Image (cartoon, rainbow, N blue to C red):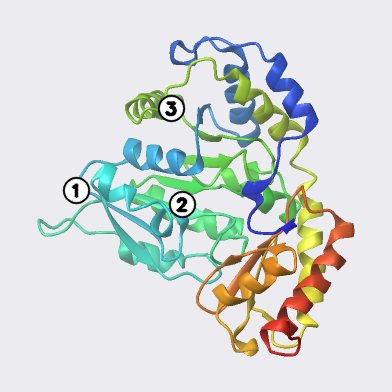
Amino acid sequence: MIDLRSDTVTKPTEEMRKAMYDAEVGDDVYQDDPTVRLLEETAADILGKESALFVTSGTQGNQIAVLTHCRPGQEIILEAESHIFYYESGATAALAGVQTRTIQGTRGAMDPAAVKEAIRGVDIHYPETGLICIENTHNRAGGAIVPSENMREIYEMAKSEGIPVHTDGARLFNTAVAAGADVKEFAQYSDTVQVCLSKGLCAPVGSIIAGSKEFIAIARKWRKRLGGGMRQAGVIAAPGLIALTKMKDRLAEDHANAKRLAEGIREISGLQVVNQVDTNILVADVSGLGVTSGEFVRHLKEQGILAGSAGSATVRFVTHFDVKENQIQNAVYSISQAARKAAGKITG
């Protein structure tokens, strides 16, 4: 099987597995796990922030950010297709007691003028705007890069209004590598940022939240409240350190493979690549085959390809460390065979 469902399926490298075995550990709730502390210090430095916190997942990181920034009854502004809004089980309402105000973006990027217009004025009838959230890369926009200039405009406007900005940067290193920039170029335009270690960077678990020392001190307490206080967590922080220090630059290989895959899919009758492939995600419309995305995903599995539905007529393919360049042509062939079978050109 060639697994193109997500970069979350990556397996830890041999170096990571060895580092897990050899990790020096302590009780992280007491903040005396040296490996976790080193991971947090390294992450803060790489992201250009004062402090950082190791959390179990990107969703936990995002929700801790909302809980730390906001009070119950406030409102957060975010893009209409964003992960926080779309894929986090309504946690902003269930946990933080805040409501969402969504803005339809262009390839994941919100218009700064529309964001400013959405900020609530002083009125007894309105909730206060407590936070603005940006997602970069933007998952449902097909791994699109939100330009740093767009982030800067939103951030500067938010500062003038006294509103904090959080970046869901689950794949922010993909953004930086594809843009040929240091990740700080993007992270600087938010008060807090969450980055995943367990996607393209290949660590088996975990994410980082980074921000000011004051913010992280409060976030640490929220992590504890959510049951995220970990004990000898150095065994999972050790591969996170390798992810941060040795796996970032190779993301360019995943981006190149995604472009190769897109070129091949464009040649397959009945399929249409519908996104601009900026990073490691591509989305194909399968309606030309006369089947639903779910039906086509089943045809793909029969041909040895795992992918995921991204809508009733669209399928998402994600390249990653465990899909090598020499597998891309095989994947294209298998996808073409699945397309022919779905269209009724192959029987049996």
Residue picked out by circle 1:
73
Q: Which mark is residue 234?
A: none
Q: Position of residue 191 (x, y in %)?
A: 46, 40
Q: CA distance from mark 1 to mark 3?
A: 22 Å
Quadrant placement of the N terminus = bottom right
Amino acid, disc 2: Glu
Local crowd size for mark 3, using a 10 Å CA cut-off: few (<14), some (14–19), many (≥20): many
145 versus 7 height, above or below: below
Q: Position of residue 344 (x, y in %)?
A: 69, 89
- Residue 198 falls in which quadrant of the image? top right
Give how far apart the Cα atoms at labels 2 and 3 are. 22 Å
Up/down of 272 relative to 253, above or below = below
Report the residue marked by disc 3. 216
Task: Kindly report which numbered mark, 2 or 3, lies closer to the viewer in this rendering.
Answer: 3
Q: Amino acid at mark 1?
A: Gly
Helix, strand or loop at label 1? It is loop
Query: Which dot marks residue 156?
Result: 2
SS at circle 2:
helix
| CB within 8 Å, label 2 to label 3 | no
